[in-house]
Amino acid sequence: MPNQLAKSKRRQSLAEHAAVLAALAEIARREDTTVMALLREGARDVVKRRATVPGQTEALRALVWRMAPRMPARFKTPAQVSRFKRAQREFDQVVLDLQLATPQAIQNRNSLVSSRQAVRLIDFDRAHAATAF
């Protein structure tokens, strides 16, 4: 019979999982948070660490970008616009937190005008000039 404590064994026992969850529950209680918040924090740390590994960076980036919110062809209500914009902001923040994109890359992706193009205001002075009587 193989050694049950062998490091090569991939399946952990229920006792090990219960011990880790009990420790997480105690930490959550002491920090006045939830176990789920701690699990999310740990998962993000794992992704952030793996995103620095050269072989995994591009694969993780491509996978995460596929999860970006998709803008519908037509918005029916202002609430739909608001929900989409909120989802887009949250997605942008998580991509930044995971260090899978730079702020400049997100700006280029979300902007209607490329950052390489200069913004031009036509007749700005005439539109905002005070009318003289």
Image (cartoon, rainbow, N blue to C red):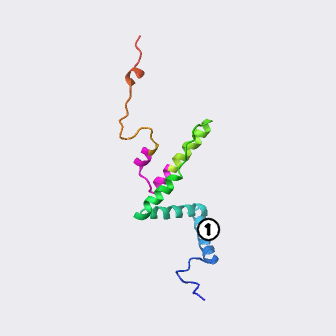
Q: Is residue 34 left or right of residue 100?
A: right
* Residue beneath the point at 61% across and 73% down: 17
| SS majority, magenta | helix
Q: Is residue 90 above or below residue 130?
A: below
Q: Is residue 66 left or right of residue 57?
A: right
Q: Amino acid at mark 1?
A: Ala
Q: Which residue is mark 1?
A: 25
Q: Is residue 48 above or below residue 2?
A: above
Q: Quadrant of the N terminus?
A: bottom right
Q: Residues within 10 Å of mark 1 (few under 14, many from 20)?
A: some
* Residue beneath the point at 57% across and 67% down: 27
Q: Does the image show residue 110?
A: yes
Which region of the structure is painted magenta? 92-108
**Which residue is outermost to the bottom?**
1
Q: Locate residue 70: give its quadrant.
A: top right
Q: Position of residue 85 (x, y in %)?
A: 54, 42
Q: Quadrant of the C terminus?
A: top left
- Badge count: 1
Q: Is residue 10 above or below residue 45?
A: below
104 or 131, nearer to the observer: 104
**Which residue is outermost to the top?**
133
Q: Position of residue 20 (x, y in %)?
A: 59, 72
Q: Position of residue 106 (x, y in %)?
A: 44, 47
Helix, strand or loop status at disc 1:
helix
104 or 29, nearer to the observer: 104
Q: Is residue 73 left or right of residue 62?
A: right
